[in-house]
Amino acid sequence: MGRLDGKVALITGGARGMGKSHVRHFVAEGARVVFGDVRDEQGAAVAAKLGERSCRYTHHDVTSEEDWAAAVALAVEVFGRLDVLVNNAGILTFALIADMPLADFRRVLEVNAVGCWLGMKAVTEEMKAAGGGSIVNISSIEGFTGAAGLSAYSASKFAVRGITKVAARELGQFGIRVNSVHPGGVLTRMVIDSAGARTDGEAEAFIKAMPLARFAEPVEISRLVAYLASDESSYSTGSEFIADGGILAGPGY
């Protein structure tokens, strides 16, 4: 018996990084998964390894209402219902406010915050039809604090945190739970790609500020997401779940 047996989930940004880990972990826990991304070659490869009985891949730009409608329709068409949404897709741009183009700031907000909002809007009716569901929004520790160079990312993740609480208020009457997950440093391609904008000293200081003094493996976040997607978290909604190695317990970084 898997923790997610009988559940049908839609996961965004599933072609690599944390999203890929979520897809694989959900399938291992018994869920059937539709996942999307804009990296079609990588996404198709993930789906091929897991098999079409367990998951399907679809091209999905989370800023597109049409793509959201198509992804939801695919889940219902192929697997008959929709129980879980994991709003995982996100981008990170590292730049000081003084140096950041407005277009870059807006793009991060569009993907990270607006994409999350569109997802909750898109799945509501199908989750009502299923008798309830669970929405897990991936925020960040940057939804609690700020770091120089992450103005757009932090703004978007604070927004996800707030949207989560509003949605929990609105959707609880339908048996739909909404929670946010706030990872700290996780070893993903997005983090590695952005690390070039930081100095070695900054990266070292970040790690030293953690009581556990290491980055997380993606699956460590996936286990928490699966718990929130499952019936084991049936009385949790509108809440924030932090997985950061303890960094927010200290004086900051």
Image: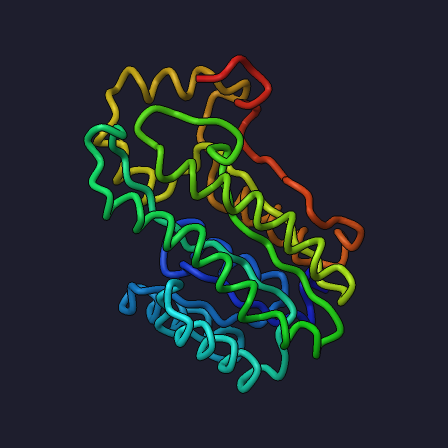
Q: Where is residue 225 in the image (x, y as percent from the top left)?
A: 60, 50
Q: Is residue 110 left or right of residue 74?
A: left
In this picture the colour scheme is: rainbow
Question: In this orientation, which residue lies closer to the viewer: 164 or 50?
Answer: 164
Q: Where is residue 128 in the image (x, y as percent from the top left)?
A: 70, 74
Q: In which quarter of the image is the C terminus?
A: top left
Q: Establish if 79 lies above or below 16.
A: below
Question: In this orientation, which residue lies closer to the viewer: 94 or 55?
Answer: 94
Q: Is residue 90 left or right of residue 197?
A: right
Q: Is residue 168 left or right of residue 47?
A: right
Q: Where is residue 4 in the image (x, y as percent from the top left)?
A: 67, 63
Q: Position of residue 187 (x, y in %)?
A: 39, 38
Q: Is residue 120 left or right of residue 173?
A: left
Number of marks in picture: 0
- Give the image quarter of residue 29: bottom right
Question: In this orientation, which residue lies closer to the viewer: 151 or 253?
Answer: 151
Q: In which quarter of the image is the N terminus?
A: bottom right
Question: In this orientation, which residue lies closer to the viewer: 64 or 131?
Answer: 64
Residue in the image at 50% along x and 33% along y: 141
Residue in the image at 47% along x and 77% along y: 69
Residue in the image at 75% along x and 59% along y: 172
Residue in the image at 53% along x and 74% along y: 54
Q: Establish if 252 lies above or below 139.
A: above
The residue at the far top in this view is: 251
